Amino acid sequence: MTKLVQFGVIARNFSSSSAMQSAIKNVTVIGGGLMGSGIAQVSAQAGQNVILVDVSSDVLAKSQKSIGANLGRVAKKMYKDKPQEGEKFVTDAMARIKTSTDPSEASKSADLVVEAIVENMSVKHKLFSQLDGVAPNHTIFASNTSSLSINEICSVVKRKDRFGGLHFFNPVPVMRLLEVVRGAETSDATYKTMMEWGKAVGKTCITCKDTPGFVVNRLLVPYICEAIRLYERGDASARDIDTAMKLGAGYPMGPLELADYVGLDTNKFILDGWHKKYPDQPLFNPIPLLDKLVAEGKLGVKAGEGFYKYDKK
Ligand SMILES: C[C@H](O)CC(=O)SCCNC(=O)CCNC(=O)[C@H](O)C(C)(C)COP(=O)(O)OP(=O)(O)OC[C@H]1O[C@@H](n2cnc3c(N)ncnc32)[C@H](O)[C@@H]1OP(=O)(O)O
Ligand SMILES: NC(=O)c1ccc[n+]([C@@H]2O[C@H](COP(=O)([O-])OP(=O)(O)OC[C@H]3O[C@@H](n4cnc5c(N)ncnc54)[C@H](O)[C@@H]3O)[C@@H](O)[C@H]2O)c1
C-alpha cells in the first residue's frame, strides 16, 4: 500500500526555465523539519516533483502548513499586482509536493535524494544503507549535514560515486548559498549534476572539500560558540552581545539569536562531534551552558525558548 499523500488540490502543468536546466525531475527529501521543508519548498518552486518524508506525520502536517505560508510570502513579492497568478503559483507548487512516512517507498522513483534528518552519523548510516538497496541505480544521494564528513556518511553505500553534500542554509527559501561538497569518490558527472540542480533551485553554488563544517560552518560555529562562552562568563548580556554584532559588525542577527534560530540541539550535535574528532582544538570544547539548555529542552525558536523566549508556533 502506498503511503504517499498529495497535498494541494489541483495539479497543473508547470514549466519553468529553471526546471529545464536540471536533469533532476524527481526529488525525495528525507526529514521534514526546519531544513527539509525549506528544501522541499525551493525544489517545488523550481518545478520539480517532490516527496517529503518524515518519521512523524505530525511533522509533515506542520511542514505542509509552513511551506504554504512561505510560498504565500514568495508569491506576494513575485506577483505583487497579480494576486490570481500568485495564488496559482502557490497551488501549483503545493500540488508538486507529496508526503510520506516511508523513506524506501519514497525513494523508488527519485533522481535525487536529499537527506535532512538528525545530525547523527549512525542514524544517517542506517537510512542510507536502507535506501541504497531500493533506489534506482542512477539516483544521486546527498546529505545536508552541517558538520559530518561526507566520506564517512557514504561509507555504507555502494554508490559512492553518486554521493555528495548539498548544504543549504536556514531559512532555505531566503538564503542564497548552497555548498556543494565533493567526497573523495564523488564522480565528475555527479558533481556537475549537483551544481546544475543547485542553480535550478535558485541558489548560488560554491564547491567545498569534505572538511569539517565546509566553509560557512567552519567559520560560523566557532563564532557562535565564542559568543555563548562570552555570555556564560557574564562578560555581557545576551541582548548586548547580539546588538554588538548586529550594529558593530553588520550581521542580520546576533550570534545568540542565530544559535536559537539554527537550534541549540543542532549547535550541540556539531560541537560534540567535532570535539570527539579533534579533542585538542579548544574552539570545539564543550560549553556547559549549551549542554544545560539542551538538557532542559530549551532548543531555541522551535522549542519556544533558548537564549530568548518565543511564541510557540
Ligand atoms: C548550521 C547550518 O548548518 C548552517 C546555517 O544555516 S547557519 C544559519 C544561516 N542563516 C543566517 O545566518 C540567517 C541570518 N538572518 C537573516 O538573514 C535574517 O534575519 C532573516 C532572513 C532570517 C530574517 O530577516 P528579517 O529581515 O529579520 O525578517 P523578515 O522581514 O521577516 O524577512 C526578511 C525577508 O525574508 C523573507 N522570509 C523570511 N523568512 C522566510 C521564509 N522562511 N520563507 C520565505 N521567505 C522568508 C521575508 O518575507 C522578507 O522578505 P522581504 O524583505 O522581501 O519582505
Ligand atoms: N538547523 C539548521 O540551521 C541547519 C542548517 C543546515 C543544515 N542543517 C542540517 O540539516 C539536518 C536537519 O536539520 P534540521 O534543523 O532540519 O533538524 P530538525 O530537527 O528540524 O528536523 C529533522 C527531522 O528529521 C526527522 N527524522 C529523524 N530521523 C528520521 C529518519 N530516519 N527518517 C525520516 N525522518 C527522520 C525528524 O522527525 C525531524 O522532523 C541536520 O543534519 C542538520 O545538521 C541544519
Image: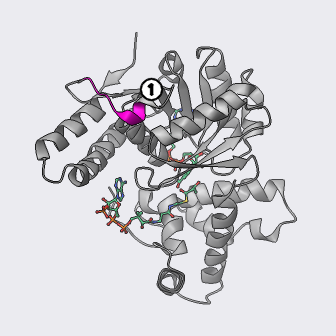
What amino acid type is highlighted by mark number 1?
Thr
Is 16 inside the magenta-drawn segment?
Answer: yes
Q: Quadrant of the N terminus?
A: top left
Q: Can you see residue 1?
A: yes
- Residue in the picture at 48% in, 71% down: 257
Q: Position of residue 80 (x, y in %)?
A: 17, 54
Q: What range of the chain is rendered magenta?
A: 13-19
User: Residue reaching furthest top?
Assistant: 1
Label 1 element class: loop
Residue placed most toward the observer, 264 or 205: 205
Give the residue pinned by disc 1.
101
The answer to whether residue 253 is left or right of residue 218 is left
Q: Position of residue 226 (x, y in %)?
A: 67, 76
Residue placed most toward the observer, 105 or 209: 209
Any atom of ligand 2 within 8 Å of the CB at mark 1? yes
- Residue in the picture at 28% in, 50% down: 74
